[in-house]
Amino acid sequence: MTQNSEMSKSEQRSLALASATLGPWRAAAAVGALGGAVSLGVSTIAEGLGMQTVTSALSVSLTLFFLVGGAGAALAGRRGVQGDRRIRRWAAAHPWRVAVVPGVLMAVSDVVVRQVLSPEGFFSSIADGLWRGIVVGGVVGLVGRYGGARGRG
């Protein structure tokens, strides 16, 4: 895309954030809540209820939320999703830049949850949040890159 070289870094970040809004965030919230509830139930039966169990369930919930919402946003550029046609086109052309948004949000959210709710140390929380953010970003990027391949070409 030749216009990409004419865009500033700030404009590219704005487009990545705007494209993230194309995701199915209500459905992502429902999937995240359901997954977190199942995780909480299974962990409570296995280990008992405690702050570590609640923290783990919230982490699962956040992971599912950002995976579903981010993957939907990455695929929105290829499907007939409502929104600005230019943003959808940009999202389809730049799936990895779209994937950065939910990946970073996942990492930050997970670190905050772990710092507030668990006795985990600061650097351990950062490590946990980083690897979860990398997984979310990687999966969303792969879905964006290859998810619409069947419809192309």
Image (tube, grey):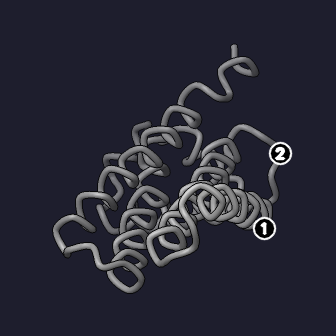
In the rendered structure, are the residues bearing label 1 and label 2 in contact, judged by CB atoms less than 8 Å apart? no
Residue at numbered disc 1: 26
Q: Amino acid type of disc 2?
A: Gly
* Identity, as a three-letter code, of the amino acid under mark 1: Arg
Mark 1 or mark 2, which has the lower sequence index? Answer: 1
Q: Is 12 placed left or right of 28 in the picture?
A: left
Q: Secondary structure at mark 1?
A: helix
Mark 2 crowdedness (10 Å alpha carbons): few <14, some 14-19, many ≥20: few
Q: Position of residue 17 (x, y in %)?
A: 50, 66
Residue 138's x, y, as percent?
Answer: 43, 39
Quickly name the residue at label 2: 80
Label disc, if present, on residue 110 of the rendered structure: none
Is 145 positioned to the left or the right of 125 in the image? right
Quarter assignment of residue 10 = bottom left
How far from the left and from the top, in percent, is residue 143? 58, 34
- 10 to the left or right of 63: left
Instruction: Inspect this view and state whether residue 74 appears.
Output: yes
Q: CA distance from mark 1 to mark 2?
A: 18 Å
Asked if residue 129 is positioned above or below residue 131 in the image, the reply reads: below
Residue at x 67%, y 41% (from the top left corner): 75
Q: Nearer the viewer, residue 29 or 93?
A: 29
- Image quadrant where one finds the C terminus: top right
Q: Nearer the viewer, mark 1 or mark 2?
A: 1
